[in-house]
Amino acid sequence: MKGIIRMIEHDFRNFLRYKWWLVGLVSMNLADLFIMAIIYNNMINVEKVKITSYFNFFAPGLTVTGLFASAFMIGREINMERRREVHHYMLSLPMTRLELALGRVLSGGLRGMVYMSPLLLTCFLFLGFPNVWQLLLILAVLFLLALGISGLSIAIAVSTSSLEKFITARGLVYYTLFFCSSVFYPLSLIEDLGKDGKFPAILVTLAELNPLSIASDMIRNFLLGEPPFSYFLLLNVLAFSAIFTFGAAFAYMKIIERK
Amino acid sequence: MRAIWFISQIALFGIIASRMINIPQYFQYYVSGLSVMTLYSAAVFIGFDIYEEAEHGVFEYLLSLPVSRRQLVLGRSIGGGLRSFIYVGPLIVISLYVIGSINPLNFLVTLFSLFLFSFGVSGMSIAIAVMIKSSDRFDILMGVLDALIVRLSTAMYPLAYVQQANPLYGGIASFNPVTFAADLFRWGTGIESTFFTLQNPLLPFLGVVAFFSLFTLLGVTIYERMIEGGGWQ
Amino acid sequence: MQQVPPIIKIENLTKKFGDLAVVDHLNLEIEEGEILGLLGPNGAGKTTAILMLATVIRPTEGTAFVGGYNIRKQPDKVRGLLGIAFQEPKMLWVSTPWDIVNWHAKVCGLSTEERKKRVKETLDAVDMWEARRKNVHALSGGMRKRTEMAKVLVQRPKIAIVDEPTAQIDIVGKHKIWNMLFELRDEGSTIILATNELYEADMLSDRVGILHKGKLLVCDTPKKLKDSILGGDIIDIQLEKDATPQIMDDLKTLKEVVDVMQTKATSLRLYLNKVEEVVPRIMSLFIKRSVPIKSIRMSEPSLDDVFAHYTGLTIEEAQKNGSER
């Protein structure tokens, strides 16, 4: 347990050192909400998408994107450690491999939660606060999502040996999950495009199953009353989180010891 | 990574978002703006290279060469702009394919403007890098600038909507070099709509020229005055 | 009297990458409280051997027992006893020396009070206190190396492994670190020192193990290693008058003397062993024969000579071959 705490402390400290990246991300997120979303308000086809305020629609999505971007960052650091053989130091520490691996996954997820919190608060300030149970469920789901994202990022980082392969793999996964979700637009729009044959069916399915979509729509349902939401979908987030948390921990333990 | 971002923006965000937007030909509009956004972010990179060189001591070597400071900075500025242009070239070709139309003569003027735009951005990046001399602060400032410059422009939406949302935003967007470049790109590719037909391309063209001139001059002046003496953090 | 078991026992430890045996059936015992030097050129297998002991990489064959724990079966317990300062400093560029050493001390279980005291003392001792808040990317190679060393020094582990501890450090810094390693040993740590610096190995080590192409060629005290070279010690004697054949015959009768050469009429060169024991007898001989001595110069073989004796190459030549390997 102590080892896990130490790893979380280590990764949090490094997270705060990437000031430039954090400021860039915060600027981009705030600019998206207070500039882009406001301008898009007047551009939306209200009849087609049934959104009266794009700003309100986007705010929960922004929370999820912030969580996604910050939880995903741990993979980049782990890949850099591997390339520079800094992981040798990690492997030499007086803690078990499981503590080391779980510590990394947990810290990635927690970093995402910490970064996302002000965005979630902003969302509540503009859209209204949920009740206690809804709030607890939102936090629980976002935490599970953050763990899964962190795990996914770590799994990519330890699976690729060269920088080029890592950047390519990371980019593909990141942007596909990012844009193929209901973060920026309603899921119904993607489904309509699929029905019209203008969007591949596999991507439509991905968007429907994407835990980013589920988390965004859940928050929207609680704060705005729509879109319709089924609690059954949360099993998806749970499965995503479980698979990538433990999968990544296992992969991290096995792969970084290899030479 | 930038190429993956570009393609995913076109293939995913562009297609889906254009369904949501109440503007005809929004997809083509967005793709053209995306090309300019990508060119901007590629041209800014020269500033990061300067910090890399300062860190590894390459800078001192460059300063020791039998080349005047002015030639050095002009070379960096033009080189940075050219490099970004070559890098983004294939992505612009993809954009043209997706947009599906082009007015050849107009597009030549557009290309020339984009050259000047990218040189201007490189010059701006160099000027800021040399003024700040701190890689952390430079990274932060460029991150903030990137977020604001792109969103407060017509890269993603027509000026009328920006002004409607907030007159201040509209004011900034009107004088934003990214706006000039994006509007000229659309004019060059012949994208027409009641929402964003460029009445007079001369104005944005002069805007790009002014931007290029200002930041090239600024870059040269600041570089010559501040480049020696170390102090890089 | 009961013999104390070695603190580290290495049995047939091997690491192969494909067909290449980087560490080839290493067998070695390390006594508690000693400084064992592993000497060899780059590519000899020192770092790989160390990484296996630290359970960072897995052996292909063989095993080792560190403090009684098997590195294959009980790696967590092994790591509890070890502290390692790597050849290349292992740190992210955004960290600071204070962060690195302080966090390392926390992970190694130091109490808050003890940690605060030791971190300051250690960073002071390696001259990194002033620079403790600078990012790693702003530090010179020597400063990073000192920070790397500080991790082991703050930890004071039962077994300290230091891989080229004074590379990239100036001579004053080297002496400081050497003194700190002696202090660490005096406080009860066993130290494994991997180095390709002959003087460092000679000066610090109680015993030196010479590694070449993954194999341990020999392991003994520096003195015994030097004495193992027949005729390795050299005495140059300058006489007041010409040397006589009789004096040369007399010198050859001494059993430690391997060869005598007359380089000039009044100069003799003796190749021998255990020079410090033989010099008084040589002096007596010259006095007995009434041959006045103008000057005497003595030299011992270096570890480079020892390395050359066992491998046929100087360490520099072996380094070139190692890089090709």
Image: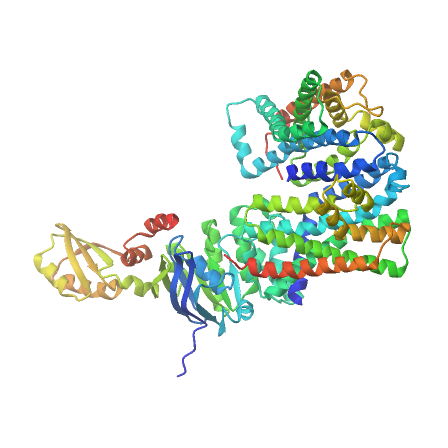
Residue C24 visible somewhere in the drawing: yes
Give the camera-side residue of C110 and B19. B19
- Up-down: is C133 above or below B188? below
Give the camera-side residue of C217 and B133. C217
Residue lying at the far bottom of the rendered structure: C1
C74 left or right of B208?
A: left
Give the quadrant of residue C297.
bottom left
Which residue shows up at 38% across the image and 53% down it? C41
A182 left or right of B114?
A: right
- Up-down: is A48 above or below B163? below
Give the quadrant of residue B107.
top right
- Up-down: is C208 above or below A228? below
C166 left or right of B20?
A: left
Q: Residue A137: x, y in percent? A: 83, 60
B120 left or right of A193?
A: left
Residue C126 visible somewhere in the drawing: no
Q: How is the image coloured?
A: rainbow
Q: Residue B95: x, y in percent? A: 69, 29
Give the camera-side residue of B107 and C122. B107
Q: How many marks?
A: 0
Residue lying at the far left of the rendered structure: C245
Q: Residue A148: x, y in percent? A: 70, 56
* The N terminus of chain C: image quadrant: bottom left
Q: Residue C211: x, y in percent? A: 36, 59
Give the camera-side residue of A71 and C246. A71
Give the quadrant of residue B169.
top right
Which residue shows up at 69% across the image and 39% down it? B8
